[in-house]
Amino acid sequence: MSPRSATSAAAASRTPPVRIESRADGSIDLGSIEVIRVLDEQGEVVNSDLEPNLPESELLRIYRGMVRSRRLDLRMLAMQRQGEMGTFAPGLGQEATQIGQVYPMTSRDWYAPSYRSIGAQVWRGWSMDQLLLLWAGYFEGFGIPEGVNDLPFSIVIGAHVPVATGVAMGIRNRKDDSVVVTNFGDGASSQGIVAESFNFAAVYKAPIIFIVESNGWAISTPIERQCGNPVLAARGVGFGLPAVRVDGNDVLGMIAACSCAIDHARRGAGPYLVEAVTYRMSLHTTADDPKVYRKEEEVKAWEGKCPIRRFENYLKARDLLDDEAIARLGEEIEQEVLAARETFRQRAIARPKEIFDFVYEQLPADLQGQKAEYMERLKRKGVEERGTG
Amino acid sequence: MSPRSATSAAAASRTPPVRIESRADGSIDLGSIEVIRVLDEQGEVVNSDLEPNLPESELLRIYRGMVRSRRLDLRMLAMQRQGEMGTFAPGLGQEATQIGQVYPMTSRDWYAPSYRSIGAQVWRGWSMDQLLLLWAGYFEGFGIPEGVNDLPFSIVIGAHVPVATGVAMGIRNRKDDSVVVTNFGDGASSQGIVAESFNFAAVYKAPIIFIVESNGWAISTPIERQCGNPVLAARGVGFGLPAVRVDGNDVLGMIAACSCAIDHARRGAGPYLVEAVTYRMSLHTTADDPKVYRKEEEVKAWEGKCPIRRFENYLKARDLLDDEAIARLGEEIEQEVLAARETFRQRAIARPKEIFDFVYEQLPADLQGQKAEYMERLKRKGVEERGTG
Amino acid sequence: MPQLTMVEALNLALGESMAADDRVCVMGEDVGVNGGVFRVTKGLLDRFGPERVIDTPLAENAIIGTAVGMAVYGLRPVAEIQFSGFTMQAFDQIEQNMARYRNRTRHRYPISMVMRAPYGGGIRAVEHHSESREAYWAHTPGLKVVIPSGPRNARALLAAAIADPDPVIFYEPKAVYRAFREEVSEEPEVMEIGKAHVVRPGGDLTLIGYGAMMRPVLEAADDLVQEHGVDVEVIDLLSIKPMDTIALVESVSKTGRCVIVHEGPRTCGVAAEIIARLNEQAFEYLLAPIRRVTGFDIHFPFFQVEKHYLPDSDSIVAAVKETMTWT
Amino acid sequence: MPQLTMVEALNLALGESMAADDRVCVMGEDVGVNGGVFRVTKGLLDRFGPERVIDTPLAENAIIGTAVGMAVYGLRPVAEIQFSGFTMQAFDQIEQNMARYRNRTRHRYPISMVMRAPYGGGIRAVEHHSESREAYWAHTPGLKVVIPSGPRNARALLAAAIADPDPVIFYEPKAVYRAFREEVSEEPEVMEIGKAHVVRPGGDLTLIGYGAMMRPVLEAADDLVQEHGVDVEVIDLLSIKPMDTIALVESVSKTGRCVIVHEGPRTCGVAAEIIARLNEQAFEYLLAPIRRVTGFDIHFPFFQVEKHYLPDSDSIVAAVKETMTWT
Ligand SMILES: Cc1ncc(C[n+]2csc(CCOP(=O)(O)OP(=O)(O)O)c2C)c(N)n1
Ligand SMILES: Cc1ncc(C[n+]2csc(CCOP(=O)(O)OP(=O)(O)O)c2C)c(N)n1
Ligand SMILES: [Mg+2]
Ligand SMILES: [Mg+2]
């Protein structure tokens, strides 16, 4: 009974229930979702038809991208623990998903990442020192590098997805041949704006690839409590989007799926939904303690599916890599990361005087008074042109 | 090329496109959507398995509900044209959908209608004169009648759907055995909040039946330009909702589908999505001119599918009705409607002094000054206690 | 010079802007085939085609979000929200992307777009169709907010809004849509955003309004001048944000008295902001408290009584007379 | 009496209200197993079970919309929005249902619910995590808006908000969450919503603040009294809507001077409303323009410079000193 004083109770449902399921006079087949991987968890090729036909140098470039992503991540975590970095969201364990989605893009394509796509952003041309600036709370970090056709990620879950869709609508209107790739999490799939974007993209046949990185968790909420149907690719059919489900820890599977989706969009056939099944190995963010809500065994089980190890095994089997090369490469990349940290430290200068300078093209008259008031404040405090923050 | 100064063009996509579709190493079957009707367009039973086993008196009650809906609609249109009624949305042609969805409900169940559900509201216990008050702009019209367990409809497309879902979550939490039925249009299906509600309902197994009245149009936007996939029942699978597609102009089909869905929800199995395929025969609202955007032929074609005529044929074939009875019943109901108009006219008294009285349980101190100011205004204008508006 | 209604004048501005700049496109619910539920976009689809006049699905948040994306891509979308009541649906994308994108990307992606919406009461409409919530946008950093009051300034300000490098909320007083005609120049005309207009000079009291309220404001002014001997100066704000503080301060420094009129709720409304600024910058000239004749902090009432709720010339006159009693 | 942080005090109030009334339930992202990202709901799931402590999917608009439905059904939901920046997502359901349902149904379905959210800057957070947009809600008819400033009033006001028959927006200053401890009574304690608190009586100037700003306000007050000989009266607003206009008018009628402090943007902010009311009701007592020390009309800056953006005691002292120069 409703705690609200209930209205008069009535007889039970008047008609005896009929089981529709078995007696329909017609039906619409919804088809199926293909589930793909190229490499299994040991790195063995299980689907050579899908194996991308890439030169060896490219395979190694992909490997380096994944390792760079991981090393940067671990370094940032260390820096955060030492107070040199703000809260950020480690991409640990999602390196294949990340690199696999940007690898097939051209530089003219548009990338709209989420906050957990640091490795992919580096691949797209963001310098590591700039990304460090960004996550350390320096406004300069947010400037999009020259020549990089990316959108800023959005801290607001799902809010970048319609913007990415709008870019794709613009592309479609102008008959430009580029495409948009955007990613978001399983949690983001619950946001209405993501559904609205699916529908807009489908209606306008906008060239956009939606990549949902289903990493098992949205902070403390597991996918089963997040979604009525945890197969997120299944959302596609309702909105009229072709969809595929990929092993997100298999970089070759990701490349195969995303290449296909990008090609589909580029030839004008419209949007595509790629569900990448992966796992968030680390903290949600550095402000989070996953021990409160998830079991160590679950994390352990996923360690065995490590995307980097898997790809290493593949490259070893193809004689492109051995343990010594792995160690050497790792060291090289570590040095890159340390050099970036050095540059970051030199660039880490707060600019308190800038805060009014990017809001409008020209500061309106009635904001000039506020700026003057603020400048007075800085002056009283003795804050210099490039204050230390 | 983007009108924004483009970044450096690059080589075409690096990997040759692979066709995933044909080479997957696994797949998830999405099942199918049952499509049902009991009566065909001539009123012949085409699926006797689904035919609800109802006493004759009930069949006639259903018929009267549909006729009442239509007569009220037509009368309101006439009143609107004569300036006696505000803008409203005729339900013409959707009588089977409306009555079919409320028929299987008990009075303890909760109904959350849309603005186009006037006939269903009458069925649920709203007096016609009150609904006339409502649409004529008198605030009293919005009060929910005693003993009626309904939510107010929402003028904001889709905005009532999460509220209905919340009621169902409450029911679920309290292990109450009532259910919620809510309806909305094909246009509403584009609103993110509707998708969010689907997901909430599925996650909590909330006892709610979502009825999407797919009537071909959302003002001037046809379903094909509204939705990437015009089969709205297909949304169900992605969100984890069982779904069915019904001929919305077949009242017995609607009753069969909704009874089944309600039973499903009532026994704790969770929400259900019912897509009722119907057609908006009249104007979108009285402020609309459909000639601007749709062809007469399309409307003509749907006239042949009239839900009332179809059901009449069925009742005639069962010897429950003949032409004379149809005429007599029509006349009886017309008189009811005219009597309601009379009552409405007597009740149509604007109460300008009330406007502060329902905002909070008690008017906060700082609003009392505003109310006093407003009362002064009324006094200056000579507006009496029950002003004529 | 043709005599146009505001609807026709807005339609003219859209057509001119689209003809002059092929980046300008129009989008929203029913703006194409139907020409908009108020016919503001009538004929544009035929002239400019479906790539530039885009009928969208029914989802305001995505309309604004995708418009932001189109602006990022380099187009200049003019997105219509069918009634301002439904901008609530788009609050997310307005506040979190439209208003912030330039700042977030340090000028890399300025958002040159307009969100148009009819606002305000007085047309006997159902719930959610009579709101005036421009103060939400005035409070939101990164936006500009413009509200015309007649056909001529509507045309010139919409042209300016479309050409503006920053995102503009453009609220159209639907009570004025077809209320009267005005001469509108055959040459394209543009007015600067951010400037108030002294509609009638006067020395005794400053009467400030905007949008649909300019009609009762001017009616009251006539009455005050002719019947009560109060020489009011009437200011049409036109731009809510940026606000032409200088013009307001100048006027009130002269008159020492002020009454402000708007339809929206009172608390934290535009009148409150004007009072705050006049208090800050014209304090020493104030001879009387500044009065607000505004909507109340309640829901817009159902239409049978809306005429009592809305500020009318009678209430404005009463407030002015009260203000004049202070010595 | 235990010494609690604000987080602990809020947790206490939630537990007490839930224990006293089985209609009260808590819902939101990560409020259950995780106990909330700030741990305000810690332990409640274990005590009250998943039917009353509901972890929701990631969709703010549906959180508020379904909470409204639960209130319609007769429950008393306390919905958490993880950060106030994400209330933009829920604007639709807040404005269109939560705030209107009672009126729309003529008291049939009052919405007795609370929307809690941490708000404000000062915790070195990323974009969208430092906003103070309480003025949006103050401008929205049908809502109440409450902002505590310390553990003790947080506990008592949250209890009052949960018991209130109307929908309450409850903004928690996250910079205060763990900033200090305060004695909190072991007996349940409830404070009346709508009352301001005179924290320090004084005769020279009225200093008004709320939420996290009470700390710099009190710091400034100490400084002013001790170093500058200004006997300030300090008022903690506590309830933004309804606003305790009487208390403010009384104080300023006595002191003749006033400075108002808040973090949110200035234009159409809460300070503007206070100034408007004081202008209306205490005009003849004003000796100086009322000053605003508030957030600016720009986006909250990235965290390396937030300390300069936020009002601090230094800026407050400067504004007070300026105000004192008027004679
Ligand atoms: C609109 C909004 N609501 C809540 C948050 C707080 N929040 C940040 S990340 C997160 C979980 C996101 O989960 P998911 O989408 O699965 O992405 P993941 O973090 O797993 O990559 C939440 C709730 C937010 N940033 N934005
Ligand atoms: C959020 C919102 N946006 C726009 C409107 C204006 N509007 C009223 S009805 C309507 C079309 C609705 O179409 P549909 O959902 O298919 O329902 P139908 O009218 O066909 O029954 C629109 C756009 C509205 N009321 N609410
Ligand atoms: Mg996730
Ligand atoms: Mg429809």
Image (tube, coloured by chain):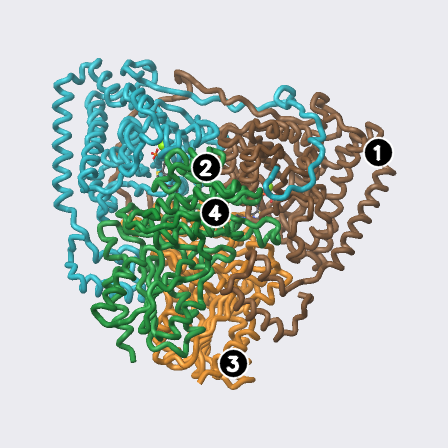
Chain colours: A cyan, B brown, C orange, D green
Of the image marks 4 and 3, the number of the one nearer the N terminus: 4
| Callout 4: CB less than 8 Å from ligand 2 | yes
What residue is disc 2 on? D53
The x, y position of residue B150, in whole percent, is 64, 43
Mark carried by residue B321: 1
What residue is disc 4 on? C60
* Label 1 environment density (alpha carbons within 10 Å; few <14, some 14–19, many ≥20): some
Q: In which quadrant of the rendered view does residue A333 lie?
A: top left
Q: CA distance from mark 4 to mark 3?
A: 44 Å
Left or right: residue A15 versus residue A240 is: right
D288 versus A369 height, above or below: below
Amino acid type at image mark 1:
Leu
Q: Secondary structure at mark 4?
A: helix
| Callout 2: CB less than 8 Å from ligand 1 | no
Label pair 4/3, CB-CB below 8 angstroms: no
- Is residue C97 or residue D208 the one in the foreground? D208
Q: CA distance from mark 2 to mark 1?
A: 55 Å
Q: CA distance from mark 2 to mark 4?
A: 32 Å
Q: Secondary structure at mark 2?
A: strand
Q: Residue at x 54, y 77 (%)?
A: C318
Amino acid type at image mark 4:
Glu
Question: Which mark's residue is nearer the viewer, 4 or 3?
Answer: 3
* Label 2 environment density (alpha carbons within 10 Å; few <14, some 14–19, many ≥20): many
Q: In which quadrant of the rendered view does residue B51 lie?
A: top right
